[in-house]
Image (cartoon, rainbow, N blue to C red):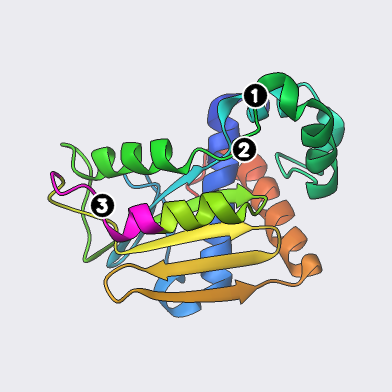
Amino acid sequence: MIKKDSTQYEKLIRENRAKRLLRFIFPVQYTKARLSDRPDIVSPSIGCEVTNSLITPIFEILSREPSVFHGDFYPLKEKVEKILNERGREIGLEEGIHDYERIYLQKLKNLNSDGYQLFEENNLFIFSWIYEEKAVMEFLELAEFPPKEYTYTFDTIYLFFDQVLMEMRLRTGEYRIYPLEEGEQKRILKRSAREVRIKTLLHLPL
């Protein structure tokens, strides 16, 4: 059984939340989605890799602050912001709290590596939690013009912020915003964690 406090458990919850959010917002495309590996979510014609954009020092801070979390690995936005305001300068966060470029280039490398299953549509889901306009704008520019050395690139990138999902369809340059009501978002996130707990205990697929 996967331990509740393990990195693997946290990863499963993150991927399961992404799956449930995609099912809720895009029921046609993701109704049969399930968790897998390389990519993390698979649907009949879609593969979607899941990651998060917060830099490592933020995770290290949050891991020592259990009051930040509501349920399993769901950071409370106001408490995260309070900690960042109090401690951000101590750990050199003047330039921002996200690491979009590093994680995006790493995921592009994975997409083009041996063992990664390609689909008709290959997507990337990024949990960002807190919106930083400068970081997001710079990332969008990078994503629109990926490095030319890669044969395959992502078709769609999803950025999940607090109660908002941003969809970027890179083939067409189309951007859309999907707001979620706070209650619905929390229900999805809580149910995702509960499903991981129960199904890993019973050795059932997610």
Q: Is residue 153 magenta?
A: no
Q: Which residues are magenta?
A: 141-149
Between 196 and 59, the one lying in front of the other is 59
Q: CA–CA distance between discs 2 and 3?
A: 22 Å
Mark 1 or mark 2: whose residue is earlier in sequence: 1
Three-letter amino acid code of the residue under disc 2: Ile
The answer, for residue 68, to whether it is visible in the render is: yes
The residue singled out by tag 1 in the image is 92
Q: Nearer the viewer, mark 3 or mark 1?
A: 1
Number of residue marks? 3
Q: Mark 1 touching mark 2, by CB under 8 A?
A: no
Q: Position of residue 183 (x, y in %)?
A: 81, 67
Image disc number at residue 97: 2
The structure residue drawn at horizontal position 59% and vertical position 74%, both measured from the top left corner, is 178
- In which quadrant of the rendered view does residue 20 lie? bottom right
Three-letter amino acid code of the residue under disc 3: Pro
Mark 3 or mark 1: whose residue is earlier in sequence: 1
